[in-house]
Image (tube, helix red, strand yellow):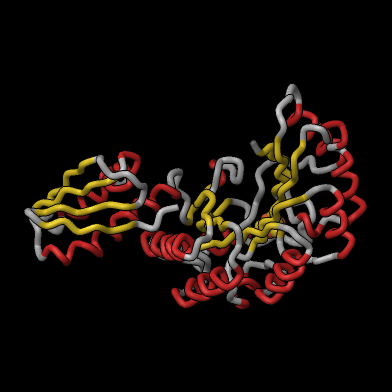
Amino acid sequence: MVVPVFLPHLGCAGRCIYCHQGYITDAGDAGIQTRIDAAFAGRTEPCDVGLFGGNIFGIAPDVLARIFSFFEPYRTLIRTFRLSTKPVPLRDETIALLKKNGVGLIELGIPTFNHTILAALNRAHTGEDLFRAYGRLKNEGFTLALQFMVGLPGETEADIDETIRNMVLLQPAYIRIYPLVVLENTPLYSLYRSGTFVPADFDDVLDRACRIYVNAVQNGIGVANVGLTDNELVRDMIAGGFYHPAYGFLVQSRIFIKAIEEVLPQFGSPAEITVIIHKNDVPLLVGHKRENIRRLAARGIAVSWDVSGKERGKFAIMSGAKIVAGCASIA
Ligand code: SF4
């Protein structure tokens, strides 16, 4: 169980052009303490605490120390802290504070390793900063995860290749993938409204998320939720981009159908197939609003399924007397 504590824009020296953390503006001490007390009200079971929103590394060490002090009444319940942050600024004092207060896991945000795009996003850090922070924090004993984005202005397939290469090199405990969302009252929104930023095709961006996801799974890297949760954005501010309430499902079901399609050529041009799958994978085979079924139907293939499969992700396709096994890289 993770108790989330939201610190909106705390420690953000400047705003990333796509970011707007909702309407909560009370990020002063009293507001933070009140939210912490509310999060622990009536809690008796041990828990982890997640600090998110803002840039934790950007919070002045004395302020961060004060925030940790607000957790003192609940110390006996807190197993560990986890947090998400930009990789800068990397301060010795901050690292010491995190260790002293029992932070175990740090998620580092690196939307892309393309420096030009990072600068255009006003991230105010580079890929080298990420590598520097990653190496230092790893040596200090923290468990590390990475947060990537897809659908960024100017993003190419080569940028996704670079993200995948660096992810495999760094071997984080897990990753998160966020599709870019255009929120009102952000600089990105102005670019979008003026036509300076024209989002790429939704399907192409979904494929990019799938590529990162598959490569993570195939390299033993976990994948935490894909897409934005309702904690992370205010729905009525969405003006465009790649938001979908079931984005993670879209990614997994796209991966599933592509894995099936890789096996299909071994059957020539079958009119009918039966897919043997784990029962929990049926929705992934069918797809969002049956889009995978329609996709196969468009190729003249009727699909049925048999849920005697034992392992998630593993499947076998049967057509006539022939059976071929396959595997979809879903976490
Ligand atoms: S994305 Fe993170 S670092 Fe950038 S403005 Fe938003 S909270 Fe701050």
Q: Is residue 253 above or below residue 87?
A: above
The reply to whether residue 205 is visible in this rendering is no
The quarter in which the N terminus is drawn is top right
Q: Nearer the viewer, residue 161 or 234?
A: 161
Residue 188, horizontal then vertical, whole percent = 58, 61
The reply to whether residue 206 is visible in this rendering is yes
Residue 62, horizontal then vertical, whole percent = 92, 52
Q: Is residue 158 above or below residue 196?
A: below
Place residue 146 in its image quadrant: bottom right
The residue that appears at 32% across and 44% down in the rendered structure is: 310
Q: Nearer the viewer, residue 239 or 28?
A: 28
Residue 5, horizontal then vertical, whole percent = 72, 40
Task: Decide if residue 113 is on the left or right side of residue 87.
Answer: left
The residue that appears at 69% across and 37% down in the rendered structure is: 3
Task: Decide if residue 317 is on the left or right side of residue 56.
Answer: left
Whereabouts is ligand 1, in terms of quadrant?
bottom right
Q: Nearer the viewer, residue 154 or 58?
A: 58
The residue that appears at 40% across and 47% down in the rendered structure is: 249
* Outermost residue toward the top in this view: 42
Residue 228, horizontal then vertical, whole percent = 54, 48
The residue that appears at 87% across and 58% down in the rendered structure is: 96
Task: Decide if residue 259 is on the left or right side of residue 49.
Answer: left
Task: Decide if residue 147 is on the left or right side of residue 272.
Answer: right
Q: How many marks?
A: 0
Place residue 56 in its image quadrant: bottom right
